[in-house]
Image (cartoon, grey):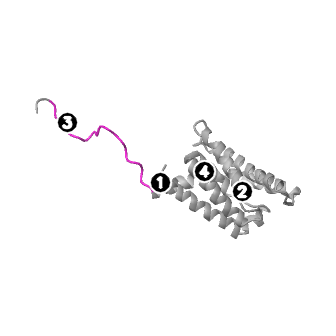
Amino acid sequence: MRPARFLIVLLLAYLAVFVQAGFDVPRVWLNGQINLVPPLMVYTALRLNLTCVTALAVLAGLWLDSLSANPLGASILPLFLTGFLLLPQREVLLQELDYAQLVLGAAASAAVPILTLILVLTKGLDPGIGWHSLWQLAVLTITGGVLTPALFRLLDRIEKALLHPPAPTLLFRPDRDMRRGRY
C-alpha cells in the first residue's frame, strides 16, 4: 500500500463531503441527498488496508456529521462496518468488474444510512422518518451504485497519472553481463 494513494482518497473524501453539503443542485433535482463517502469506503476496502478503512471511517464520519443533523460520531461506526465487512472478502469479489462495483456501491450506500438511522434511534433522538425517507434511501442507493464504478475509474486514472509504478523486484536482471568459464 502506498501512502499517496490513501492521501488521494482522503482528499477526495474531504472534497466530496463539502461539495455535497455546499451545492444544492443535485439535492433539488433528485429531491434527495447524494453521498459519495460509501462508494469511497468500498474503494478503500477493496484496494487499501484496515488502517486506511479505519482512518477514512473516522475522518469522513466526523466530516459528514459536522455538516449534518446527525450527532457527532454517528456515521463512524456504519462506515467502518461497511469497510470492515468488505475487507476479508476482497480476494473473492470480482472488484475489477463494473457490475460488481455497482452492486457493492449500492449495498454500501444503502447500508450506511440504515445503520446510521439505527444508531440515531437507539440514542433516543427523533430523526423525522416518513415516506419521503424511502425516496431518499432509493436516491442514495441508486446514485451510490452508479457512481461507484465511475469513482473506481477516476481514482485509478488519478493514481496512474500522479504515482509512479512500483519498481520491479527481480533478483536476476536480464540486462546484466554474465561471464562464463574461467575468471
Whole-percent x and y of residue 174? 28, 39
Quarter of image, res 151: bottom right
Q: Is residue 167 magenta?
A: yes
Kind of residue at badge 3: Met
The residue wearing badge 2 is 75
Kind of residue at badge 2: Ser
Q: Earlier in the sequence, mark 3 or mark 4?
A: 4
| Cα separation between marks 3 and 1 | 35 Å
The residue wearing badge 4 is 53
Q: Earlier in the sequence, mark 1 or mark 4?
A: 4
Q: Which of 25 and 62 is in front in this view?
A: 62
Residues at marks 1 and 4 touching, judged by CB atoms closer than 8 Å: no
The residue wearing badge 1 is 160
Q: Which of marks 2 and 1 is nearer the N terminus?
A: 2
75 horizontally vs 95: left or right: right
Residues at marks 3 and 4 touching, judged by CB atoms closer than 8 Å: no
